[in-house]
Amino acid sequence: MSAAGLIVRVDATGDLTVKAGDHVRRGQRLSRNPEPHAQAKSPVAGVIKSVQFDPERHEFVIAIAPAE
Amino acid sequence: MTLLILTLAFVNLAPAVESASPRVDGNDLSFYQPPTTKGSYRLTSGKEVRNVILCIGDGMGLNQIALASITVAGPGGRLCIERLPVTGLVRTYSASSRVTDSAAAGTALACGVKTKNGMIGVTPDEKVYQTILEAAKARGMATGLVATSTITHATPASFASHVSSRATEAAIADQLIANRVNVLFGGGRKYFLPQSDPNSARKDDKDLIAEARQAGYTYLTSDSELRTVRGSHVLGLFQLDSLKTTAPEPSLASLTRKAIQLLTKAKSTGSDRRRGFFLMVEGSQIDWACHSNDAKREMRQMLLFDQAVQAAMDFALRDGHTLVIVTADHETGGLTLFEDTKTNTGPIAKWSTKGHTGSPVPIAAFGPGAAVFAGMQDNTDIPKKIARLLKITRFPRPVK
């Protein structure tokens, strides 16, 4: 799949709170990381375009299409 | 350590990350033949432990084993792992979280101490602790690391390097060679190439492959080279990144068999008398399949790992002085199994998370000393027990 989007990378130890197709608000939590200081938040309002796992870096790669 | 990187630019997404070559069906399980015997291997007693093979299934909880086992061997069948005679459970929490990552768990399994997620071979205050591999080497034993990830990934790295961040794989590569681990088999060639090479992931001019050769390593990259290689120090890097786990690469079982063959012939350090070996074998990509909640891929990786355990067991049964331990660093995916009542066919996998869980993981053991791994234990207990069986004193201990 190829899609334009804003990329957020987050360590894969914790669970995600979003999936592809979800609408997110700016500042909304994207993951439920066990380390509180490292919980990922969406930098923009928009739609989650895709979520992929990057095994080399052990991270989730979350693509967000910003709202118009 | 959690990394959060925001790329504030619009980019095209890369294709989904694949762990298997497109040239074969990554879900095909026909390569695996389950054991024809369901009974447990016999307990061993009264013998001295000379060799230790520690097999780690990354992300392998009880249901990761059960799903593969029920699917290929039926409800009454067994994988090789399930035939080991001593079983127990392992708590896996880290110093920073009830849910560990592979770096903190690897450090617990290697050094016998808790650390924060993301840290390798050091305590949260960055004090360096000796690993069980380093302690075995200091005792004159040959040592080896085999993985289907990059050989610099968190689990193998935990046994022969000390860094505050698992992401520093080039620095880990330096330490693996400096530590003179006899056998290093895995992926991650890009961390051994100088930055002048277009395939390099290093940010310096160090040619670690050339340095390894100068230090006495035989370097190889293919299955054909693997078949004929000899030597006391062998560096096998079969991919730039992680292994594809398909032909023409050597399988994890082949790598394990070859590592054992090389280690039994490797000269000891500092003594004329050969004093056995310590080998860590990781089925790295069970975790990756579980992060994707991909049951078929999980089973395939699980069975590839089971074949490697079988290779270890084949040697241990012949040798009589080899302790084989199989465990996991953590569980991934929160996998549970349900009956499909409509079709009455195999188990249905249900996942509760895309991440890791804090569930205890299984441990199984065979060989002299195996009984000490029965029951509930902490992951930091495992290298301490190995040290006692190898008569290694003062473990765990910080390195001055």
Image: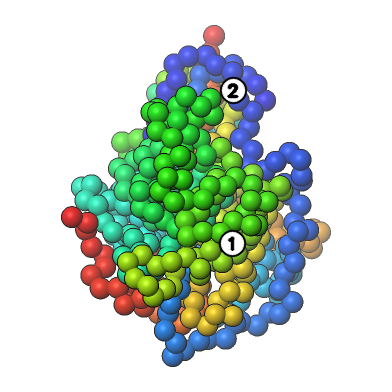
- The image quarter containing residue B269 is bottom left
Residue A50 at x, y percent in the picture: 59, 28
- The image quarter containing residue B195 is top left
Badge number at residue B258: 1
Residue B141 visible in the snapshot = yes
Which residue is more in the foreground, B308 or A39? Answer: B308
Residue B203 at x, y percent in the picture: 40, 27
Horizontal arrangement in the rendering, residue B173 relative to residue B135 (left or right): right
Regarding mark 2 in the picture, which secondary structure is present there? loop
Residue at the spot x=45%, y=79% of the render?
Answer: B370
Which of pointers 2 and 1 lies earlier in the amino acid sequence?
Answer: 2
Badge number at residue B78: none
Which residue in the protein does label 2 denote? B13
Above or below — where is B373 with respect to B280? below
Q: Which of the chains bears the disc numbered 2?
A: B
Amino acid under disc 1: Lys
